[in-house]
């Protein structure tokens, strides 16, 4: 399957830019997940009925 015609051996150059973002530009940072999320996650992981 080749939807965009990009060959398998195509190499993409990754450019990292550490330039600071101007103060007037909003920075989208993920918020911390609530503790309840982790409690639920641990409960799901430990329940054998819910494991694949």
Image: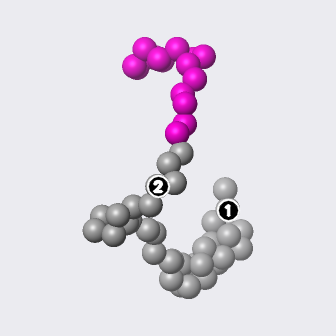
The local crowd at label 2, few if under 14, some if 14 to 19, many if 20 or more residues have their Cα within 10 Å, is: few
**Residue stretch rendered in magenta on the structure:** 1-15
Q: Residue at x 68, y 70 (%)?
A: 45
* Colour logic: one colour
Q: Is residue 22 left or right of residue 14?
A: left
Compare residues 9 and 35 and report the one nearer the observer. Answer: 9
Does label 1 or label 2 sit earlier along the sequence? 2
Q: Where residue 50 sits in the image (x, y, percent)?
A: 63, 66
Question: Where on the picture, by quarter, is residue 29?
Answer: bottom left
Nearer the observer: mark 1 or 2; the answer is 2
Q: Residue at x 54, y 28 (%)?
A: 12
The answer to whether residue 19 is seen in the rendering is yes
Magenta: main secondary structure = loop
Question: Where on the picture, by quarter, is residue 40?
Answer: bottom right
Compare residues 10 and 44 and report the one nearer the observer. Answer: 10
Q: Where residue 5 sits in the image (x, y, percent)?
A: 43, 14
Instruction: Say which residue label 2 marks.
Output: 19
Quadrant where the C terminus sits is: bottom right
Q: Residue at x 59, y 78 (%)?
A: 38
Q: Is residue 30 magenta?
A: no
Q: Residue furthest left?
A: 24
Residue 51 tag number: 1
Q: Residue furthest bottom?
A: 35
Q: In the image, is residue 7 above or below residue 22?
A: above
Q: Secondary structure at mark 2?
A: loop
Q: Secondary structure at mark 1?
A: loop
The local crowd at label 1, few if under 14, some if 14 to 19, many if 20 or more residues have their Cα within 10 Å, is: few
The answer to whether residue 47 is seen in the rendering is no
């Amino acid at each position: 399957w080749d939807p965009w015609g990009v060959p398998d051996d195509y190499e993409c150059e990754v450019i990292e830019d550490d330039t600071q973002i101007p103060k007037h530009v909003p920075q989208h940072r993920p918020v911390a997940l609530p503790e309840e999320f982790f409690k639920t996650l641990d409960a799901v992981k430990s329940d054998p009925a819910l494991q694949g």
